[in-house]
Image (cartoon, grey):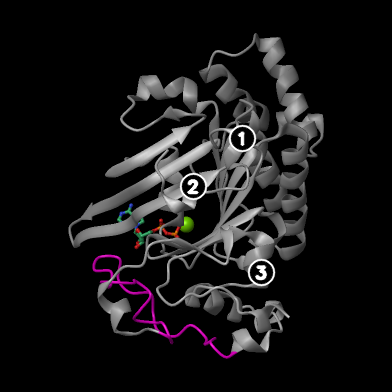
Amino acid sequence: MSASPDTVRPDAGQGDPLLAVEDLVVRYDTPQGVVHAVDGVSLTVGRGETLGLVGESGCGKSTLGRAILRLIEPASGRIRLDGEDLSGKSRAALRPIRRKLQMVFQDPFGSLDPRWTVGQLLAEPLHVHGIGRRSERRDRVIDLLARVGLPADAASRHPHEFSGGQRQRIGIARALALSPALVVCDEPVSALDVSVQAQILNLLDDLQRDLGVAFLFISHDLSVVEHIADRVGVMYLGRIVETAPRAVLWRRPLHPYTRALFDAVPRMEPDRPAERRTRAALTGDLPSAFAPPAGCRFHTRCPLAVERCRHEAPSLRAVGDPDHLVACHLAEPPSKTDLA
Ligand code: ADP
Ligand code: MG
């Protein structure tokens, strides 16, 4: 692993993280030009950990999640799972690794054949990977259904017969079929009612406790991430601008963009007058991903921007807490009076 500062973690002494992404770049070539969707992202996810990834729609969260699974080919950068470098591996070479890495989508069955039964949907990953005999696969399906809180007879029904929350339980069961080490959850509760969201988040928590599975949990909604993440990464226009353990970030968001995100959720406003002075609501639109601003990408919307921010891109650095990394020239550790 490189000495990149955002690979620093509290368990850094306990060997490699489960997932290490280094300087990942993903672009889309379109007739209108090149979209710089992910532009130099480094992050780690520890075993059994949940890293929440937040940011406005269009900042590159899904692209990052899909590139980690190699559903999209990155332009450059490295992805390591369990110490194994996935970059440049062929499809065939990736296959055994795929078992360790799964994905849950906002709409779990958007791309699947609606004629399949739930039992067939859950057995399919086992079948593809040649796991178990028919009867063993049937037992595994029943076990998976129980794990996600669905009755055994759900196996003979079709996804459209279930509610949104139940369908997401089926999507989670399918992702767990191969006992993965990491599941990328891309907005898994964003389409659900708030009460159902809480049930699914609780389910993910229980599954993590019982199975030790790690999650990269993507959401545009800070209040969702607050319920599930151990650590949080904040993304803006293809870059990570701040990462910290959840409690640290909620207590003291340091990047002006993160602060603006918190301000957009009034009930989460921390009551710290010293911080509020530097806060401002997020104004203006997200700049075009075809031509992201030079320097700090947030400078066009930042209430604090100075000349340096317009031409010099800030890199992530520890500010105050060694686990609290911020990509902002102006971020400073808390003063003694702030801590009082
Ligand atoms: P998020 O998940 O944070 O909403 P996305 O990863 O979906 O963001 O998108 C990041 C950027 O890439 C956006 O500017 C989006 O318009 C663009 N984008 C996403 N998918 C494609 C694609 N298939 N072709 C071209 N541009 C894309
Ligand atoms: Mg998305």
Label 1 to label 2: alpha-carbon separation: 13 Å
Q: Is mark 1 within 8 Å of ligand 1?
A: no
Label 1 to label 3: alpha-carbon separation: 26 Å
Q: Earlier in the sequence, mark 3 or mark 2?
A: 2
Residue 74 visible in the shown view: no
- Coordinates of residue 45 in the picture (x, y in percent): 56, 43
**Residue reaching furthest to the top:** 133
- Report how many numbered discs are placed on residues in the image: 3
- Relative to residue 326, is residue 136 depicted above or below? above
- Coordinates of residue 95 in the picture (x, y in percent): 44, 22
Q: Which residues are magenta?
A: 277-304
Secondary structure state at the residue bearing disc 3: helix
Q: Is mark 3 within 8 Å of ligand 1?
A: no
Q: Is residue 303 magenta?
A: yes
Q: Which of the two residues, 236 or 177, is positioned nearer the viewer here? A: 236
- Foreground disc of the pair 3, 2: 2
Q: Residue at x 80, y 32 (%)?
A: 146
Circle 1 residue: 14
